[in-house]
Amino acid sequence: MSNWDSITQQRWFMGKGRKVNSIKEYDTLPTGDTKISIVEVCFDKDENDFYAVIEDECKIGSVLAEYFGKKLPKEALIRAKPLNAEQSNSAFYSKGEFFFKLYRRLQVGEHPEAEIMEHLSQKTAQGFPKIAPEFYGDFSYTKSGETRTLGILEEHIPDARNAWEIFTDVQNGDAEFYKSAARQLGRTTATMHKALKDLEGTAPQAEEVPYDKLIRLLKANGREDLVERVECIKLQQGQEITKSNVLTPQRIHGDYHLGQLLYKDGKFIVLDFEGEPTRTLEYRRRLRSPAADIAGMLRSFAYASAVRNDKDFEQTAAEAFLLGYSEESGIPVAQLKEEASPYVLGKAIYEACYELEFRPSWFWIPEKLLV
């Protein structure tokens, strides 16, 4: 159907760069005085993706009131308005009441974010420290025995700041504040891993590091000088990243960085447990070493340091973060550094690919770990 062609231009469309053969409406869900269309996008090689499209997004409040009205006050749900921070998904909220994330690309199976947030809410109800918004429920859709999660409803945390904004605030030169905040963040991260330790998931597998992709991108961008170095890293690190002595595979955040946290009243609240949206649900539900999350945050400090143009900031924040994680987990800092090291390098390889593809001017940040 040609009237669906415009979705390929949306920011949340994940098929950019792939040849689209057809776009058609797979199903329609009349709801809340509007409708949600499930749209099927077919690519070459018999591959396809499904997307959720709301006919009138101004009526999202009516949609939520109809779906969640038995659990929450309809008068609050009806007040939903869009959050102007659209990325791979869309968000709607009512300040201090709820936050609704609409997943644009839909996959069949249990969604990791709904699963993890429900688990963390249960832990909080049992007396565990609160480290995530309260989970109110998921918006799921089933057809022909296949269930897809269209979105999740959770608590909205008002008047909180994003952690990335805090750590990149060049007007704040208070080193002690950042040490304290990073240390608290380390404790929060260890608490998150403790809470997720008993949540089941798919079987652990070796980490997937895009060495070959980076080599292709380096050649395509005239950086053949780094190819031999990446090939050496691949040989040296290829097996090490699967080793672990203390940080054994379990459910983790999966896409952990400063942008995934809020900061309020001296505490951190963790958000966005969906993992990397381009990955399969099976991968995102996989048991992985907590070192992957630790590495993600350490690399996020590297980016914050680059934005601040402060070469000492990364080390200061990283040391405080690891100290906090050690205090909460009981794992020595030296052990954390050892087990996180190959994951840090693997994350830098992933970042290098991303920057060469989409932000070449930022490539120098991960490049520092490759030379």
Image (tube, rainbow, N blue to C red):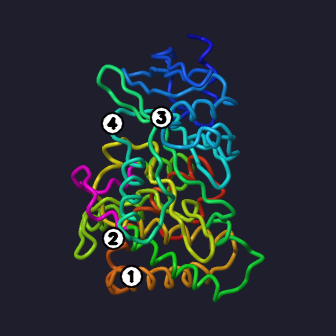
Asked if residue 116 lies left or right of residue 58, the reply is: left
Tell me whether the residue at label 1 lies in contact with that at label 2, contact meaning CB atoms closer than 8 angstroms.
Answer: yes
List the single residue furthest toward the bottom. Answer: 176
Please give the residue where the numbered disc 3 appears in the rendered image.
150
Please give the residue where the numbered disc 4 appears in the rendered image.
109
Please give the residue where the numbered disc 1 appears in the rendered image.
328
Q: Mark 2 or 4 closer to N-term?
A: 4
In space, the residues marked 2 and 3 are separated at their CA atoms by 28 Å
Q: Amino acid at mark 1?
A: Glu
Q: Mark 1 or 2 closer to N-term?
A: 2
The answer to whether any part of residue 188 appears in the image is yes
Residue 265, quarter of the rendered image: bottom right
Tell me which residue sits at (51%, 45%) in the image: 153
In space, the residues marked 3 and 4 are separated at their CA atoms by 11 Å
Relative image position of residue 134 (x, y in whole percent): 49, 56
Q: Amino acid at mark 3?
A: Leu
Relative image position of residue 357 (x, y in whole percent): 56, 47
The answer to whether any part of residue 371 appears in the image is no
In space, the residues marked 1 and 3 are separated at their CA atoms by 35 Å
